[in-house]
Image (tube, rainbow, N blue to C red):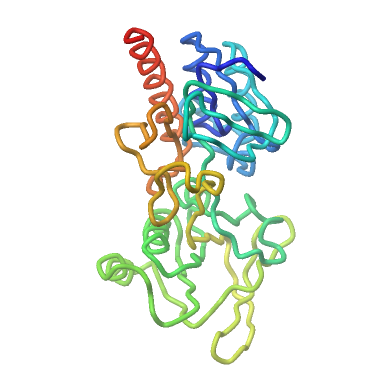
């Protein structure tokens, strides 16, 4: 494609698609590089009950398909391709996919972040059926049930504390006696009567046929394995932002998240960012969508100002 696009959006989760909706309504004719599995993490989510506008909830894949259709309705061009490299060293920016090469005046990076998983035999099979990596997304489904949280950092303590709003009991399973969590977060979890700790233990499998029924736990000191009954398994072992192709092209923090300079701007003029790829804190569909809208509005203003100066 030799045409120089007004804006190219990398990513097709809530951030990228909302950016597409706003950019296309501004008549910027955006191209969205959706990847081979469009829709982001929500394509792996069953029912979503906390996205505004759906009082009875909506299935993750249905929500994302609706957002894709909405973006296309207003003029976004959705390309089912994988980005292989970007060149932000000069304008127009060059984005190479597995099928084509694109030139763009502006780019919105919205490739998201993936939860880290343990790659257990039945982990992905029971994902959305009791296995989750987001307590604020799925905790509501575990009212009066028992859950486990795997991890030993601040995220694990936060997840455990949040789950006590719904669950009868939350067992934090950690592979050692030392916790990476900050003292204040660890103390808060210890003080919660619903939270118990299982140390020197690692989860080696998830049990259940069509829903989680328990986990198999291995003692890291003795090697002994036991089955532990639970209704839900929450992984809190971190997220990995999808920034591999951005190395050397844009400023990333020590955890490889894109650094935001001003609202949605990056250190490269004309390159904007939205969603989980720059947000290690909230990681919600609605906040990603909101920042996607902000990024598109910032792009519209940037292009208008640039055109005026030229």
* Quarter that holds the C terminus: top left
Residue 102 in picture, x, y percent from top left: 62, 25
168 horizontally vs 76: left or right: left
304 horizontally vs 230: left or right: left
- Residue in view at x 56 percent, y 60 percent: 232
Residue 48 in picture, x, y percent from top left: 54, 38
Give the quadrant of residue 251.
Answer: top left
* Quarter that holds the N terminus: top right
Say which of 244 and 53 sits in front. 244
Q: Residue furthest front?
A: 90
Say which of 7 and 224 sits in front. 7
29 horizontally vs 288: left or right: right
- Residue in view at x 49 percent, y 51 percent: 134
Say which of 132 and 260 sits in front. 260
74 horizontally vs 101: left or right: left
Q: Residue furthest bottom?
A: 222
Residue 185 in picture, x, y percent from top left: 30, 65
Give the quadrant of residue 265.
Answer: top left
Total marks drawn?
A: 0
- Residue in view at x 52 percent, y 46 percent: 243
Q: Residue furthest left?
A: 184
Position of residue 280 relative to residue 98, above or below, is below
Position of residue 58 relative to residue 174, above or below, is above
Give the quadrant of residue 263.
Answer: top left
């Amino acid at each position: 494609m030799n045409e120089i696009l007004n804006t190219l959006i990398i990513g097709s989760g809530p951030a990228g698609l909302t950016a597409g909706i706003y950019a296309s309504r501004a008549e910027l004719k955006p191209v969205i590089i959706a990847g081979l599995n469009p829709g982001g993490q929500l394509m792996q989510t069953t029912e979503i009950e906390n996205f505004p506008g759906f009082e009875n909830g909506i299935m993750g894949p249905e929500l994302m398909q609706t957002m894709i259709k909405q973006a296309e309705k207003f003029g976004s061009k959705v390309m089912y391709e994988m980005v292989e490299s970007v060149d932000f060293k000069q304008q127009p920016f060059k984005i190479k996919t597995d099928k084509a090469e694109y030139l763009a005046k502006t780019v919105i990076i919205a490739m998201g972040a993936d939860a880290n998983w343990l790659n257990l035999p039945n982990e992905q099979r029971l994902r959305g059926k009791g296995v989750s990596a987001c307590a604020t997304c799925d905790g509501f489904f575990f009212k009066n049930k028992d859950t486990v949280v795997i991890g030993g950092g601040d995220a694990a303590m936060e997840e455990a504390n949040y789950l006590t709003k719904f669950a009868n009991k939350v067992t934090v399973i950690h592979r050692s006696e030392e916790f990476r969590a900050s003292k204040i977060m660890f103390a808060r979890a210890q003080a919660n009567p619903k939270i118990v700790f299982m140390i020197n233990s690692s989860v080696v499998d998830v049990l259940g046929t069509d829903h989680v029924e328990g986990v198999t736990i291995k003692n890291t000191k003795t090697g002994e394995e036991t089955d532990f009954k639970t209704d839900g398994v929450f992984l809190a072992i971190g997220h990995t932002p999808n920034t591999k192709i951005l190395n050397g092209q844009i400023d990333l923090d020590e955890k490889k998240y894109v650094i935001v300079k001003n609202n949605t701007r990056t250190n490269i003029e004309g390159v904007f960012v939205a969603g989980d790829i720059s947000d290690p804190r909230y990681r919600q569909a609605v906040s990603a969508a909101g920042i996607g809208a902000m990024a598109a509005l910032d792009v519209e203003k940037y292009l208008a100002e640039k055109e005026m100066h030229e």
